[in-house]
Amino acid sequence: MALDVRPAPGGARVAPPPQRRRWRTRLSRLDVSLSPYLYISPFYLLFLVFGLFPLGYTFWVSLNHWEIIGGHEYIGLQNYSRLLTDDQFWNAVGNTFGMFLLATVPQLLLALFLANALNRKMRAPTLFRMGVLLPLVTSIAAVAIVFTQIFGRDYGMANWFLHFFGVHKIDWQANKWSAWLAVATMVDWRWTGYNSLIFLAGMQAIPRSLYEAAAIDGATRIRQFWSVTVPLLRPTIIFVTIISTIGGLQLFTEPLMFNSGYMNGGSLRQSQTVMMYMYENAFQRFQYGYGSAVAWMLFLLILVFSLLNFLIIRRLSRGAT
Amino acid sequence: MKAVIRRRTHRAVAGSARLWQASPLTYVVLIFGVVLSAFPLYWMFVVATRTNAVVGAVPPPFIAGQHLGANLRRLFDNEQAHFAKALVNSAIASAVVAFSTVFFSSLAGFAFAKLRFRGRNALLLLIVGTMMVPVQMGIIPLYMVMVHVHWTGKLQAVIVPFLVTGFGVFMMRQYAGQAVPDELIEAARVDGASTFRIFWSVVLPALRPAASVLALFTFMQTWNDFLWPRAVLNPDNPTVQVSLALLNSAYFNDYTLMFAGTVVATVPLAIVFVVFGRQIIGGIMDGAVKA
């Protein structure tokens, strides 16, 4: 696309240079000066049309009362002020953060420990790495179908397993906490291995001499993990946490499939996320303006929360050193 | 005194060498992790080979049955799911997006890493910035754009917006910087090669390892994408994931049908993973160190 924008030098075409050589020099100079822009332009064109414009336009739409395509009316920040008193919206925010925390905290801890285990001299390291990464090859939709069945009330494997421990049948979808837990399990299953590989990469960059020095000082394995590995892994931990935050706050497919495709996240909206609420407003109630306002609020939440994460982790891991 | 210190040091260092050796406990932890990772996939396959009668069985079945063929036939005969069409759609979209992302990302990555031009740093910074913005944010107006150009329900709606990504450009730029020596490019230039010729004959071959990782990732991502295809495509012209969701909402009691669908949707990626697993792992770990 757009590869034919290379302009022929107009003047040169009207009056061809007397010497073929000069013509070629000019052409190659043009090649050198124009090529870079030509090569990077596809990205910017696509981004402009399908990325930046939609993003800006979302903001414009969010300032309007915009029902179905066509008629709309500028109403300023009214959509936003309506959002602030919208119980369903705050319910979705609460659900999103609940599921995000329930999924991310154990996930990152697990990934850290898994990476620590993978970071040793062992037989068949690639096999183990591929093993923990296996869930990544499945689609979220497939994962959700499988786990929804596992967390079924009557025939689910989770309840069957729990009954050995005397736990009575849990209706996973019906309660807020159990629904959150089920969705968090899906997320963790899929992403823990991936994150542990990223941690592993960071761990391999830590010089072993530091561990030797720590060992000489008499530090135990556990002490070494918390006092050497974790502080030196800080950039990786920040990176993984922020990526998980961006992904986690946009949670959509898992809770949707867990509710058999219902955008409301269950009869009491017990597992409706912000993303689902946005979708419900825009594509089911056809309130594009209001849906766009939800989208921008989510964007702000992600921004604020990523920044907060960054500051907290930096402080925490600095405290450990 | 010195001897004592030396002995103690010696012992500690030997201990730390042992520290790097995986202990039996390490293996137990890792095997447990692998089993947990593999089990839902294995179980997906088990249910897909069974009849619906066993879904309520106590204890649940843990060994494959013989009905995979019958379940697959029901899946592909199902008129609502359009599963065969969905497979073709997903294959086309994933292949086109992967191919074009690699091509345009390599081109742009080469320009950013090896060519001098005005505004290079600012333009690169902009690309890094776009990586922070979640694509899903713009989904409503993106949908409006698609309505406007009459692309809703058509496959190009899930292809064209993703032909090249900021992530891809950035990744190839990082790789090109270290994989292609400047001298090689200069030499080709002196020999009279055009910029595109240099890209095609000198740079692209050198980028092959990173390009294949990017291709794999992009393919997997497009194959697995759900939110946008679900918004913009019609139920009668779906991708695999949309079709799975259709099955899930319409036949949520017919587990073996749905599980047969998830197996078929997962098999192509599983093959890719088995064949290219080493590269995928390398790609993830490389990306992490550089980030």
Image (cartoon, rainbow, N blue to C red):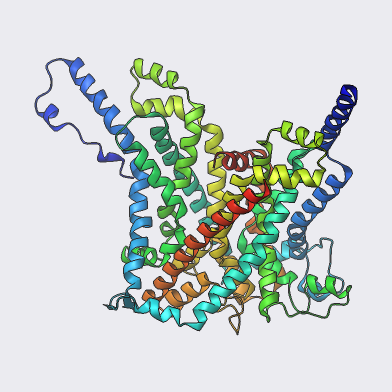
- Residue A315 percent location from the top left of the image: 59, 53
A237 left or right of A58 in image: right
**Which residue of the protein is positioned furthest toward the front in this rendering?**
B1
Q: Residue at x 42, y 49 (%)?
A: B129
Comparing B81 with A255, the one in front is A255
Comparing A129 with B197, the one in front is A129
- Residue B158 percent location from the top left of the image: 45, 58
Q: Is residue B142 above or below residue A165?
A: above
- Residue A98 percent location from the top left of the image: 62, 71
Count of residue discs? 0
**Which residue of the protein is positioned furthest toward the bottom in this rendering?**
A267
- Residue B218 percent location from the top left of the image: 53, 48
B5 left or right of A58 in image: right
Rendered image quadrant of residue B169: top left
Is residue B147 shown to the viewer in this render?
A: no
Q: Residue at x 73, y 58 (%)?
A: B41
Comparing A75 with A162, the one in front is A75
Quarter placement of the C terminus of chain A? top right
B218 left or right of A190 in image: left
Q: Residue at x 23, y 19 (%)?
A: A25
Quarter placement of the N terminus of chain A? top left
B177 left or right of A72 in image: right
Comparing A126 with A310, the one in front is A310
Rendered image quadrant of residue B105: top left
Q: Residue at x 50, y 46 (%)?
A: B98
Is residue A217 shown to the viewer in this render?
A: yes
